[in-house]
Amino acid sequence: MSTQAAAPTPSTSDESPYATMMSHFDEAARLASIDRSEFEILRRPDREVLVSLPVLRDDGSVAVLDGWRVQHNAGLGPYCGPLRIEGSVDLHDLRAMAAWMTWKCALLGVPFGGAAGAIALDRSKFSSAEMERAVRRYVACMVDVIGPERDVFTPDKARDEHVMGWVMDTYSMHRRSTTNAIVAGKPLVMGGSRHSDDAAAQGLRILFELATRHFGLGSERTGPTVIVEGAGFVGGNLARLLHEGDCRVVGLSDKDGGLYNPAGLDIPAILAQRTPEGGLGQVKGAFDRIAHEQLIRQPSEVYATCATANSITLRNCSAINTKLILEGQHGAVSAPAYRTLRERGIKVVPDILARGGDTLSGYFEWVQNRMGYAWQSGDILQRMRRFLEEAWADVVRVHTERDVTLRTAAQIVAVTRVANADRTRGIYA
């Protein structure tokens, strides 16, 4: 359990995801007049757990890996958040993700708190069997602090549904009963929910519609022009949904560069040629290949960031040529870059609102598992739209009444709700 005091407010030049999260929280807490004691509680996690994971390698040797779980706040309900598996793990990034989950759940009206976990494992250097053993050992080590009423796991990436299956099976074996509500994003055959694979994109599409209508983007005949950064399970699915909705997607990128055609890209043809990881290197079609630095300069009415954190920083924010940014990745716009965009009059639909779709999908799956339901596709999308429309209305109300940005408004709504819940519950020794 962590006993380290929370870090001070980051400097205005710090562009790390943790600094971005803390900067926005600090501003919202100040504007919402959060009491000092509540402020100190909310800016640090409730609990941080570190475990050592001995893993038997295929060659008979043993590797000892590190595993973490950061549980940020349980004022509104059980913790909930992703399990990340990657070779290099930054504890500050996990703290940021756990806090983002807290604010996101509060903003959406979902009865969860935020959490995030990780296993320091390089997927390229471990076999699938070795990774499974690592995940199962991790769950066994965490079994006393997780559970459907304690801490629910979600996948970090859409391809990790098999990882969620391992988590569910291991936890169930320890509890001696099938407990499918311990995880979301698992295979459909194990109690998973429809649309878990494209929930993030479905949510982004709904917020895209709400925001572009609110700001009067697009024309009567066609939807707004869009550039989508990222062609994986979030960006690729979003590009597909927008194309189907008669928007002109003029740019699409992967980690190596972008495809650009001002007349519009043939999104179905492009997606059909992608690699499983969302790579566009071998795609052929009517477009120009340009570097990221050039793609961000191309004109569009909406720029959707669906790739990595810090894709828009002080280095490139002055070059972006758009009217609205849809932040489809947590921390995609750094705090210093955000201040520059605000001065330029560029609107930003913030991550804790824009990325609500996958959080809602996890909540819906948890509800279905606990109640023995299996909702159909239409039921899930209808419920998702209702939650997101209500959250959008709350944000726009604060945005208008207090004359603050959408990001600040969203953060004020979220922080106020969590602070009120903590205050109502009180402090128990």
Image: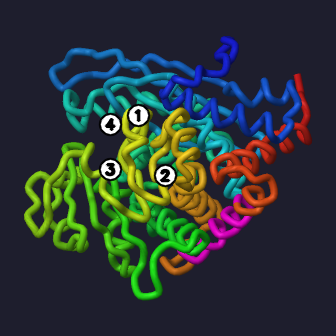
The answer to whether residue 330 is above or below residue 378 is above
Identify the residue at the far front of this view: 344
Which quadrant is the C terminus positioned in?
top right
Mark 2 or 4: in front is 2
Residue 241 appears at what percent x and percent y?
Answer: 38, 72
- Can residue 356 be seen from the camera position used here? yes
Q: CA distance from mark 2 to mark 4?
A: 32 Å
Identify the residue at the far bottom of this view: 221
- Name the residue nearer the viewer: 399 or 382: 399
To which residue does mark 1 refer?
136
Of the image marks 2 and 4, the number of the one nearer the N terminus: 4
To which residue does mark 3 refer?
296
**Amino acid of disc 4:** Glu
**Amino acid of disc 1:** Arg
- At label 2, counting other C-alpha atoms closer than 10 Å, the crowd grade (few under 14, some 14-19, many 20 or more) is many
**Amino acid of disc 2:** Glu
Residue 164 left/right relative to 123 = right
Mark 3 or 1: in front is 3
To which residue does mark 4 refer?
132
Residue 330 appears at what percent x and percent y?
Answer: 49, 43
Q: Is residue 389 magenta?
A: yes
Q: Secondary structure at mark 2?
A: strand
The colour scheme used to paint the residues is: rainbow
Q: Is residue 43 magenta?
A: no
Q: CA distance from mark 4 to mark 3?
A: 39 Å
- Name the residue nearer the viewer: 187 or 221: 221
Q: Secondary structure at mark 4?
A: helix
**Amino acid of disc 3:** Ile
Residue 232 left/right relative to 30 = left
Of the image marks 4 and 3, the number of the one nearer the N terminus: 4
Q: Residue at x 86, y 25 (%)?
A: 37
- Name the residue nearer the viewer: 168 or 231: 231
